[in-house]
Image (cartoon, rainbow, N blue to C red):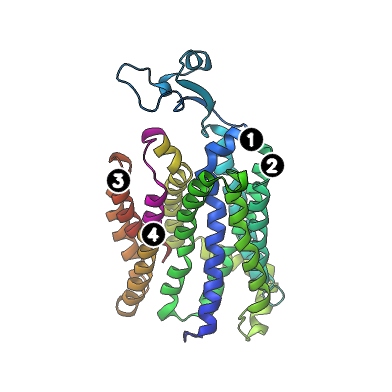
Amino acid sequence: MGDITVSKLYFLSLMTLSYIVGELTHFLINTTSREVAREVEFGEKSCFPNKSVVSEKEPDQFDCPESKNETHCGAEEHCYWEYSGLGIQYQILAGPAFILVFIFSAVFLAILSDWLYDKLSRTIMLAAGTATFSVACLLMGVASSYWQLVVLRMMIAAGLSVCRPVSGGLIAELFSASSRGVANGIFSWGVYYGYGLAFVFGIYITKADVLGYGWRAPYVLAALPGLVLAILLATTVKDPRQKDTEEKNQSSRDGRAYVRTLAKSFLSPSMLILLVAAFFRHTAGYCWAYNTRLFFQFYYPEFDIGLWTFCASVFGGSFGVFAGGFFSDRLVKSLGLPSRLWLLSACTIIAAPLAVGTLYFPPPGAFGCLILYYFFAETWFA
């Protein structure tokens, strides 16, 4: 199964495109939070300069963001009090509402896939997950209350949680060890293209005000490709289950044996170290991802980050993860399997000061650091 064929590349393309759409629906709230908050009305309010009154700030003019209450803000003719897109309600919507469902759904679905090895088609699971996050994103585009948004974010998490574990298993069976790292790297492009496209959709399509729908249009447009991909996954590809199923089926049905095997693998020192590292890495990563636009809107409100962030994510992230897979595959051939961890450790050390530079330097210097950071840090996925 190690030979690369057109059918396997087609399969990989569908999985990757599905992942791209999933990550687009995942991060779209990051790039539209202010517009969504102002229409749906949730989160904190802040004081903003009214550009229809004055286009440029005069030297002795009061700086609107310094005002901490509505009364003080309203007293200034050139200021107005409005939802900022920040606050605990936004953080719950972006973070816990998604992450908690995503974690438990991913574990449950991975175990279910193993347990029902001979009965549950992974391509149907992937199609169902793609349809779920696509429909949820579409419905977010017509939501009218905060709690509707929370429930739909949970649905996006449940659908997206299928992609990585199921696709990872499919890739492991489709591609041999010599090409698996590159295949995983290509699949992991979904994170970077999806995240980058969230800025293109959330900023530029919202500004275009398509048919007068404002921030709602990006959610509807982002969902449509996912529905097409769900149909293609369900109808044009099949689960490449290996045929030596008797022994596999027996072990998958033996619940106690399965739990013992799972516990043994999970409690191994290398797995625990990777788990702790993942905790810190993804905590920082999601804090940044969910607040990127808000960070630059607050500190550099006049700088257009849309294309910069797209390029940083796509070029830095996708090339980084592809290079990580490419070089780790070649290191494994000469130095063995532990060399993947050696490469990961070296790249993580190099990436750390670049992350600091992203926050320290003003744009566009911040994005130069971000591109290099992604290039080194995203070898993690390979």
Of the numbered discs 4 and 3, the one sitting upstream in the chain is 4
Badges 4 and 2: C-beta atoms under 8 Å apart?
Answer: no
Magenta span covers which residues? 298-313
Query: What residue did someone put label 2 on?
Result: 148
3D distance between C-alphas at marks 1 and 2: 10 Å
Mark in front: 1 vs 4:
1
Q: Do the residues labelled 2 and 3 touch (CB within 8 Å)?
A: no
Disc sitting over residue 167 in the figure: none
Cα–Cα span, label 4 and label 3: 17 Å
Tell me if mark 2 has few (under 14), some (14-19) or many (20+) residues whose alpha carbon lies within 10 angstroms of its own. Answer: some
Q: Is residue 104 visible?
A: no
Location of mark 1 (residue):
40
Label 3 neighbour load within 10 Å: few <14, some 14-19, many 20+:
some
Pointer 3 residue: 364
* Front: mark 1 or 2: 1
- Find residue 25 and report its horizontal and vertical position in percent: 57, 53
